[in-house]
Image (cartoon, rainbow, N blue to C red):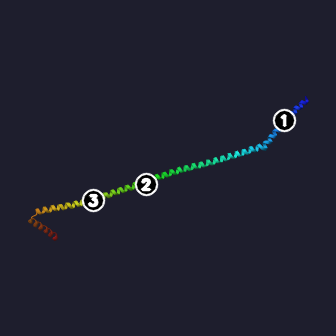
């Protein structure tokens, strides 16, 4: 049994040594060929991830810049709209003021023209009334005054003139 035991132990140690050698060969193969491939793949993957993250960050930055530009454009549009409304309101007020002033001026001119027309009409009416009154008075005077009354009136008038000159 001793020999059997020896063979058994040799067989066990042979399996242990072959397992160790196998593991050593696996470690050697891993370190020599597999790990560099895995590391290279990992580095490529990391590089791709880094590139993707950089690209994502650039896209976010561009997106933020575009959002800021959009916000700025909206603010500019609001300011332009406010300025346009203010300008339109000023223009409307100016036009309204000018129209009001022109209307008031036309009204004053018309009022002055009306007063001049009234004054001219009054003068014409007065002149016509005076002329009619004189015509009526002359006709009435011719009818009422006879030669005797005429001579008395002339003597009275001449006497009043002499009193004024003498006196």
| Secondary structure category for the residue under label 2 | helix
- The residue carrying mark 3 is 117
- Determine contact: label 2, label 1, CB under 8 Å: no
Vertical placement of residue 77 versus 20, above or below: below
Vertical placement of residue 53 versus 120, above or below: above
Q: Quadrant of the C terminus?
A: bottom left
- The residue carrying mark 2 is 91
Q: Residue at x 47, y 53 (%)?
A: 84
Task: Residue lying at the far left in this picture: please name it.
Answer: 148
Vertical placement of residue 107 versus 34, above or below: below
Q: Position of residue 106 (x, y in %)?
A: 34, 57
| Secondary structure category for the residue under label 3 | helix
Q: Residue at x 68, y 46 (%)?
A: 48
| Secondary structure category for the residue under label 1 | helix
Q: Position of residue 44 (x, y in %)?
A: 71, 46
Q: Quadrant of the N terminus?
A: top right
């Amino acid at each position: 049994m001793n020999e059997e035991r020896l063979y058994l132990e040799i067989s066990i140690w042979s399996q242990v040594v072959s397992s160790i050698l196998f593991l050593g060969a696996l470690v050697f193969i891993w370190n020599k060929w597999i790990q560099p491939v895995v590391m290279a793949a990992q580095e490529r993957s990391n590089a791709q991830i880094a590139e993707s993250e950089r690209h994502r960050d650039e896209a976010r930055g561009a997106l933020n810049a575009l959002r800021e530009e959009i916000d700025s454009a909206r603010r500019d549009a609001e300011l332009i709209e406010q300025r346009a409304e203010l300008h339109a309101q000023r223009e409307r007020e100016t036009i309204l003021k000018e129209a009001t002033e022109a209307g008031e001026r036309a009204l004053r001119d018309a009022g002055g023209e009306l007063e001049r027309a009234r004054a001219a009409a009054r003068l014409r009416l007065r002149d016509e009334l005076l002329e009619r009154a004189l015509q009526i008075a002359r006709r009435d005077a011719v009818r009422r005054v006879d030669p005797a009354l005429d001579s008395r009136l002339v003597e009275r008038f001449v006497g009043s003139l002499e009193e004024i000159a003498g006196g």
